[in-house]
Structure formats: C-alpha cells, structure tokens
Image (cartoon, rainbow, N blue to C red):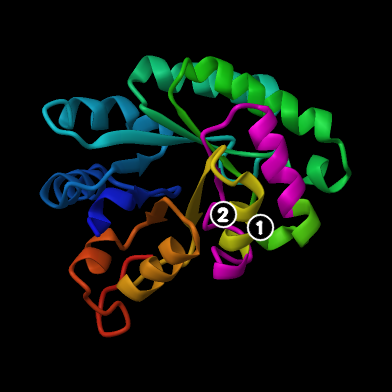
C-alpha cells in the first residue's frame, strides 16, 4: 500500500506562519503526499511552490463551522479555483441538517460543486455532532449534489474520525463517492484502521509521522 498517496497533508489554523507552510510544502514534496490542505490565503503560494510536482493543492470552504451564507461559500469556492486550488473541502451547515432543512444543505453543496468546475469537492459533515441517521442523510445529500467525497470532520469539532462512522459513510455512498477520514488520525495504525474501514483519503497534520511510522506519543513536539 502506498500510504502517502492517501494523505492530504494539512496545516490549518488562525496563526499559521509562512515558515510552517514552507515546511508543509517541503514535506509534501519529499513524501509525495496526495495533497497539501491549507487555508485559502495560502492557495496561490502553495500552487506556485508545487507547480513542478504531482502534489495537489486543497483548501477549505466555510471553515471551520459551516455557518457561512451559501453565497459566501460559492464565492470562496470561485476564488479558490482562481487561485489554483485543485480540491475543495467544504463544511456543511450542520444546524440546517439537524433541523431537516435538507434543501438548504443541498443548495450550498451544489453551489460549491458548480464553482469547482469539475474539481474534487469533499463535503465535511462533522460527524461528532450527528446521529447515525443524520450521517446517512448528509452523505446522501452530498451524493445528490454530485460531490466527490464525504468527509468526517474539520478537526475543530468535539471529535474526529471514527472507524464506526467511516464504515457507515462508506456503506451509504458505496461506490458513488469516496470517504475522507479526518480529525485525530495521528499514527500509522490510525491511518490503516481508517483505510480498512473504507476511507480513500486521510486528512492529517501528522502525515510524516504516519508514513515513517514514528510514534506521536513519543515525540516531544507533536503536531496536531
């Protein structure tokens, strides 16, 4: 298994420096990760740095809470594409899903998919806030909107990916979409469990630890 090809090497947050982004890019190039996932302000910079590599540039939309107006999410997606993003990870409006306002969730996903113009769109459903039935319903809405992936988590919620949720999502979307496990996937063992459960992409800031099988627990300066 080429584990590196599953990994979206991620650095997201409110206080990410250029030096941290440079390190992320260098690691992605060295280990040939599938993509780097960065905040929208770094998309253009990352795209230029990775132009002679096979590493894709992923960014986030409506992040981290998903409570942006659907038109704002559309605009974010449009600008990200203009800046060079290859993949878009968007957060749904969790409140609307839980309120059974499925038309609102469908509309916002469709808007982002349209602006992506054929690029990969991963729909973050934030499973930590959802029941099993809501996870299935969110996954089906993502399918209706023609999204490429359903994704477990932002990593900023009350919990991250679980084997149980990944299996449920995969059973729901079957072969019509893929599943991305994100949030709390920090070790080689974590990644393997998620892939065996059905994940076809792993979002993590510990990509190097995973592919080198280095123990995060024994690392005096772990990255989460």
- The dot on residue 90 is none
The quarter of the picture where residue 171 lies is: bottom right
Can residue 10 be seen in the rendering of this structure?
Answer: yes
Looking at the picture, how far across and down is residue 88, in whole percent? 46, 32
Residue designated by label 1: 127
**Cβ–Cβ under 8 Å for marks 1 and 2:** yes
Q: Which residues are magenta?
A: 135-164
Q: Is residue 132 left or right of residue 210?
A: right
Give the residue drawn at x 64%, y 20%: 111
Question: Looking at the image, which residue is at 43% across and 65% down?
Answer: 196
Magenta includes 39? Answer: no
Residue 204, position as x, y percentages in the image:
38, 57
Image point (67%, 19%), residue name: 71
Query: Where is residue 33 shown, x and y percent of the image?
Result: 23, 48
Give the side of residue 167 with respect to residue 119, left or right: right
Q: In the displayed structure, would residue 114 be above or below residue 99? A: above
């Amino acid at each position: 298994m080429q584990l590196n090809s599953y990994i979206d090497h991620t650095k997201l947050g409110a206080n990410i420096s250029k030096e941290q982004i440079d390190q992320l890019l260098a690691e992605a190039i060295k280990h040939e990760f599938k993509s780097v996932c960065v905040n929208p302000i770094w998309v253009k910079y990352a795209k230029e740095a990775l132009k002679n590599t096979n590493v894709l540039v992923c960014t986030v939309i409506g992040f981290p809470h998903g409570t942006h107006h659907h038109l704002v999410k559309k605009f974010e997606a449009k600008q990200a594409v203009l800046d060079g993003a290859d993949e878009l990870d968007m957060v749904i409006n969790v409140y609307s899903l839980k309120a059974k306002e499925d038309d609102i969730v469908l509309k916002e996903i469709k808007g982002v998919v349209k602006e992506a113009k054929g690029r990969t769109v991963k729909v973050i459903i934030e499973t930590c806030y959802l029941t099993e039935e809501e996870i299935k319903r969110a996954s089906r809405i993502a399918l209706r909107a023609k999204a490429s992936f359903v994704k477990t988590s932002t990593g900023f919620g009350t919990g991250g990916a679980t084997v149980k949720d990944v299996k449920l999502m995969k059973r729901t979307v079957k072969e019509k979409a893929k599943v991305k496990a994100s949030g709390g996937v920090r070790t080689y063992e974590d990644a393997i469990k998620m892939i065996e459960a059905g994940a076809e992409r792993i979002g993590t800031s510990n990509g190097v630890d995973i592919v080198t099988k280095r123990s995060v627990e024994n690392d005096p300066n772990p990255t989460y």
